[in-house]
Image (cartoon, rainbow, N blue to C red):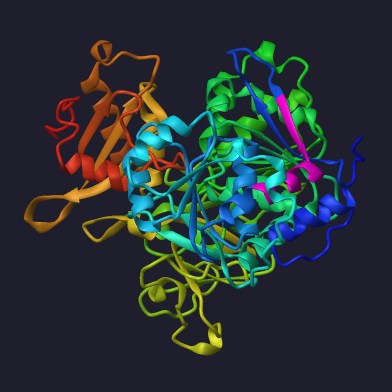
Amino acid sequence: MDSRRPPLAPECPTLPEYVRHWAGTTPDRRAFTFVEHPAQHSRGVHRTLTWRRLDVRVRALAARLADGTRPGDRVALLCPQGTEYVTAFLAALAAGLVAVPLYTPGLPGHADRLAGVLADARPSVVVTTSRAQDEVRDFLGAGGPRLVVADEVPDDEGRTWQPVTPDAGATAYLQYTSGSTRAPAGVMISHGNVVANARQALVAYGLDTRPMTSVGWLPLYHDMGLVLSVAAPVARGALSVLMDPAAFLHEPVRWLRLLAAHPGAVSAAPNFAYDYCVATVTPDQREGLRLDRVTALINGSEPVRPGTADRFHAAFADQGLAPGTHCPSYGLAEATVFVCAARPGEPLTRFALDRDALAAGKALPARPDDPRAVLLAGCGTPAGQRVRVADPVSRALLSEGEVGEIWVQGPNVGRGYWDRDSEEVFGAEFADPAAGPGRWLRTGDLGTVLEGQLIVTGRRKDLIIIDGRNHYPQDIEGTAQEAHDAIRRDRLAAFAAPGGAGGECAVVVAEHARTARLAALDVPAVVRAVRGAVSARHGLRLADVVLVPPGTVPRTSSGKVSRALTRTRYLEGAYRGQDRAGAAG
């Protein structure tokens, strides 16, 4: 029987040492539970590992992985979501190898990326499960790396194996970026990085002293999924409850039921997930839900929109969801994941900023009801690290209210990119060393600080610059999706494309709603509505508006819309056969 409060955690230098600690001190406590949903309306089948059982499985698989490999060899994880994924990740670390968290080849639309990452990482071993081994073997082909099936390794294989004690500065795993603005790159995360970031997140969300249960459906190959659902619970000795991302997408109330079932629940989800719950969870499904014991719901989308939190809490207020549970946060793979967070229990910090001033690099207040105002949420403050805003060209430290590039420094910042020059990103220095001594991580994200809160305004590489004016693509996308009911929320991309006279023009590619048929839509009317709204609100003339079927706008492996890939496909003419009603503009 579990007690409500986990024991105080020691300070261990690596995650496998935490596993061994909890296996020795609290062997029968639950460590990881995977909830499988085998049928459409299934309430879930629970499969649980105690800390003792987790340690046994980690030792067995680590012994198998260590056989025939050398310290530093890469181990690619091509497992479905589940406890075997957790075991394989921790076993690779315990064996002194470098884990590469990935996914099975069946993930729709990502086979090319998977092949590219495997070619870059060059693993000696690939770990999968008996359920996925056939598709993984077919994908790897003849002459590929050695294949280990995690659930077929017997327990007694680790009985005499002695764990490796890697240096805290050694690389623990390669976290491949999602590739939303560039080709995927493997960030080298050390054992010390991931332990530090797990502790930072626990402190930031107040989970270092109170009971907690991590409840997650984010994929474990994603940086937030890995840290919040594996690293933080291991460092805290707390229960982690996992479900498959597809199970959430098929029936999002499943996530809410798991939140309701576990006291002190903490979870993370991208912006679309909160709106998706509002749109799809029925009144009948809400009956009986009690969300008053949820501690924190993390929203790490960039930027975080206050309206999303408002809609979610209005929809589930009757289920006891406290307004202070929504925690806008900011992070990136290069910093392991966590950088800044709003604290649980505090009201959402809202900022209404003048759009034109923001585009010019100044965060000036505006009336919230002004149609030209940009409404953003504060992402709180860092824990255990330093955050500054710098001029990306002059490398000068900027004052509060000035928009620039977000720079980060701390024990969680990764060692660099695997097998490529990383100095420009990981070795930045201020022009005046007194402004911030030492080396800094250049995030590529734009933001500012107001009232002590970090505000993320967008990606530097995503900026659309037309006639000398800056436009944030997420602002244009927000306006476009509100312009007509036929536009599918959070499934559109705004970007710059080559225009006349050597300049650039602005384009929007948007999926239409699943409830609408393209043949039955008045496409010219939809295009006119989008053009008119963007022109009125942003003073920007769209050169092209393309309406495409659901599932056509590409996304990264973490679920974000990939503006870079959408732009590439647009320029290659991939959408010409879809709808060209907007091209005449």
Image quarter where the C terminus lies is top left
The residue closer to the viewer here, 169 or 136, is 136
Q: Position of residue 488 (x, y in %)?
A: 39, 26
Q: Quadrant of residue 503?
A: bottom left
The residue closer to the viewer here, 331 or 510, is 331
The residue closer to the viewer here, 5 or 541, is 5
Residue interval drawn in magenta:
46-60
54 relative to 175 in the view: left or right: right
Which residue sits at x=63%, y=44%?
Answer: 86
358 relative to 219 in the view: left or right: left
Within the magenta stretch, is there residue 88?
no
153 is higher (above) or lower (below) than 391: above
Q: What is the total number of numbered labels drawn onto the structure image?
A: 0
5 relative to 497 in the view: left or right: right
197 is higher (above) or lower (below) than 547: below
Q: Position of residue 141 (x, y in %)?
A: 33, 40
Residue 206 shows up from this direction: no
Which residue sits at x=45%, y=78%?
Answer: 428
Within the magenta stretch, is there residue 53?
yes
The residue closer to the viewer here, 319 or 307, is 319
389 is higher (above) or lower (below) than 53: below
